[in-house]
Image (cartoon, grey):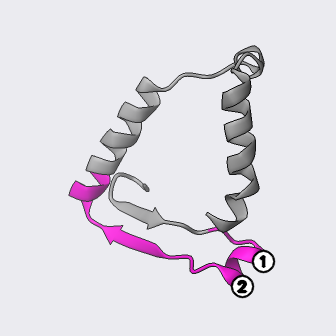
Amino acid sequence: MVDRHYAHIGSANLDTRSLRLNFEMIVEIYSRTTAETLVAHFEEQAERSREMTLRELEARSLLTRMRDALCWLFTPYL
């Protein structure tokens, strides 16, 4: 969102793999109403989120860590 008037929605990775293999798309929105809605949503999500410590990450169960590791293997395809 830019100045609560203009927004991009989509994926825009400017790396070699993305430019050659992925179909990256962006929608540009020139609408103050839509941009304000997106800003409100972003701010709400930021308020609901919290920072995790390294200790919390390391304390996850083995099953959770294995699930995350398995998912990490497929990130180039997701």
Q: Which mark is residue 2?
A: none
Give above or below for 63 relative to 4.
above
Q: Residue furthest front?
A: 63
Q: Between residues 12 and 56, which one lies in front from this camera angle?
A: 56
Residue 38 position in % (x across, y down): 33, 49
Q: Which mark is residue 20?
A: 2
Q: CA distance from mark 2 to mark 1?
A: 6 Å
Query: Magenta part of the protein: which range?
Result: 13-36
Q: In which image quadrant can residue 75 be found?
A: bottom right
Give the residue number, with chain letter if any, for mark 1. Answer: 16
Q: Amino acid at mark 1?
A: Thr
Tag 2 near tag 1, CB within 8 Å: yes
Q: Residue furthest bottom?
A: 20
Give above or below for 11 relative to 39.
below
Say what secondary structure mark 1 lies in.
helix
Q: Quadrant of the C terminus?
A: bottom right
Q: Between residues 42 and 67, which one lies in front from this camera angle?
A: 67
Q: In which image quadrant can residue 69 be found?
A: top right
Q: Amino acid at mark 2?
A: Arg
Dot 2 crowding, Cα within 10 Å, few <14, some 14–19, many 20+: few
Relative side of 35 to 60, left or right: left
Residue 7 position in % (x across, y down): 40, 62
Give above or below for 33 relative to 25.
above
Say what secondary structure mark 2 lies in.
helix
